[in-house]
Image (spheres, rainbow, N blue to C red):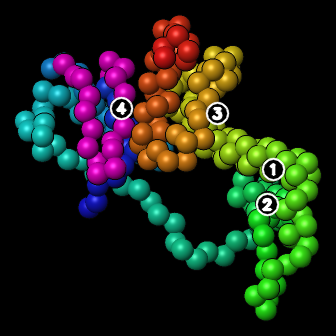
């Protein structure tokens, strides 16, 4: 048995939270309430709070079926490339742009005269750096799109259709949050943001 992060904890009265990186969580409940746990689409029954004699030592287990590592597939359908593949192809396509801006040396250790000449082409280098910045921003936005999906947001918040579309535009997370936050922290951000959204609070107004 291992502790699991990002397990969704819900109560019948509508409280929701997620376990942290070592399986801990905190949630407000009353004596007449019940709690349930969900992970990767698998849910437990609701546990009545009154029947939990030792809340600090309350453990549950979720039976998750793990597929065999090796399987024979009759047919494989490739739907699309991942953002990582797109990013690698993007870098390769614009390799010269990403490599612009520094002095280069030959295999013998001598300074490459072409790179020295290029270092003094200020106008061209400025344009190249600007283009490089745009490419990096494009990669970051694709990374956000890869994690901040409608399916995930709908599962956590319960929002649908127009509300879901509007929420994802208003509360789109930053690249730093998506890239560096742990999974449970990212899920909690979405959950907390949805509560502000349902209360009519806009991101700038909250800040």
Number of numbered discs overlaid on the protein picture: 4
Q: Callout 4: helix, strand or loop? A: strand
Q: Which of marks 3 and 1 is nearer the N terminus?
A: 1
**Residue at x 52%, y 40% (from the top left corner):** 177
Q: Earlier in the sequence, mark 3 or mark 2?
A: 2
Q: Can you tell which mark lies on residue 129?
A: 1
**Residue linked to disc 2:** 101
Q: Alpha carbon of mark 3 to alpha carbon of mark 2: how far?
A: 39 Å
Q: Can you tell which mark lies on residue 150?
A: 3
In this rendering, would 17 be left or right of 96?
Answer: left
In this rendering, would 28 be left or right of 116?
Answer: left
| Rendered view: 107 above or below 138 | below
| Rendered view: 84 above or below 24 | below
Q: Alpha carbon of mark 3 to alpha carbon of mark 1: how far?
A: 34 Å
Instruction: Give the farthest residue toward the bottom.
Output: 108
**Residue linked to disc 4:** 17
């Amino acid at each position: 048995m291992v502790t699991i992060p990002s397990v969704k904890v819900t109560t019948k009265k509508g409280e929701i939270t997620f376990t942290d990186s070592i399986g801990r969580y905190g949630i407000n409940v009353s004596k007449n309430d019940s709690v349930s746990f969900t992970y990767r689409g698998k849910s437990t029954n609701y546990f009545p709070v009154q029947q939990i004699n030792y809340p600090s030592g309350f453990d549950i287990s979720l039976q998750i079926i793990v597929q065999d590592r090796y399987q024979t597939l009759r047919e494989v359908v490739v739907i699309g490339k991942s953002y990582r593949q797109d990013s690698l192809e993007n870098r390769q396509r614009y390799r010269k742009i990403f490599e612009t801006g520094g002095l280069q040396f030959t295999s013998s250790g001598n300074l490459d005269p072409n790179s020295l000449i290029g270092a003094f082409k200020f106008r061209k280098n400025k344009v190249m750096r600007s283009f490089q910045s745009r490419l990096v921003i494009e990669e970051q936005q694709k990374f956000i799109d890869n994690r901040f999906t409608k399916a995930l947001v709908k599962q956590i918040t319960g929002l649908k259709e127009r509300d879901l579309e509007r929420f994802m535009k208003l509360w789109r997370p930053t690249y730093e949050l998506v890239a560096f936050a742990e999974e449970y922290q990212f899920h909690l951000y979405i959950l907390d943001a949805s509560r502000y959204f349902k209360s009519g609070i806009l991101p700038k107004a909250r800040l």
